[in-house]
């Protein structure tokens, strides 16, 4: 699937690129990742999965914002955030 398909299906919309908003999202992703690194010390993989997943998803959202795109649909949010960032 190409970026145009995401735009055509209204999963992603074109916006003004925003380095400031991208930085905020990247900082938030970093907090989730830091939490996951600390949780890893408790030896419970289930505790680590959710914050790592969120860190990746939010970091991908940051990349899209930096390039002038934003995910719109909540149902396919993971797909529309992570795939175009690859």
Image (tube, rainbow, N blue to C red):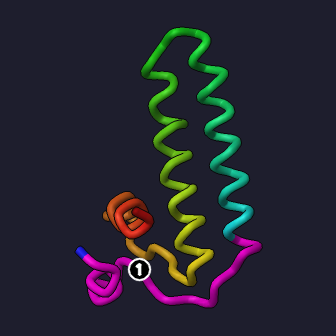
Residue 41: image x %, image y %? Answer: 61, 12
Q: Quadrant of the N terminus?
A: bottom left
Task: Please determine whether, in this image, residue 61 is positioned above or below residue 37.
Answer: below
Residue 17 falls inside the magenta stretch: yes
Helix, strand or loop under label 1: strand
**Residue at x 44%, y 18% (from the top left corner):** 45
**Residue at x 58%, y 10% (from the top left corner):** 42
Residue stretch rendered in magenta on the structure: 2-21
**Residue at x 68%, y 33% (from the top left corner):** 34
Residue 49: image x %, image y %? Answer: 45, 30
Task: Please determine whether, in this image, residue 21 is positioned above or below residue 82.
Answer: below
Taking depth in this image into account, of 70 and 66 the one nearest to the observer is 66
The picture quadrant where one finds residue 3 is: bottom left
Determine whether, in the image, residue 40 is placed left or right of residue 80.
Answer: right
Determine whether, in the image, residue 15 is placed left or right of residue 73.
Answer: right
Residue 3 falls inside the magenta stretch: yes
For disc 1, the neighbor class at 10 Å (few under 14, some 14 to 19, many from 20) is: many
Q: Quadrant of the C terminus?
A: bottom left
Q: Which residue is mark 1?
A: 12
Number of residue marks: 1
């Amino acid at each position: 699937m190409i970026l145009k398909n995401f735009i055509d299906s209204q999963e992603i919309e074109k916006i003004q690129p925003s380095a400031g908003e991208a930085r905020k999202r990247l900082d938030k992703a970093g907090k989730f990742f830091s939490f996951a690194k600390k949780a890893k010390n408790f030896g419970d993989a289930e505790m680590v999965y959710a914050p790592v997943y969120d860190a990746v998803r939010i970091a991908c959202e940051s990349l899209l914002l930096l390039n002038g795109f934003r995910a719109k649909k909540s149902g396919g949010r993971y797909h529309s955030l992570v795939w175009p960032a690859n």
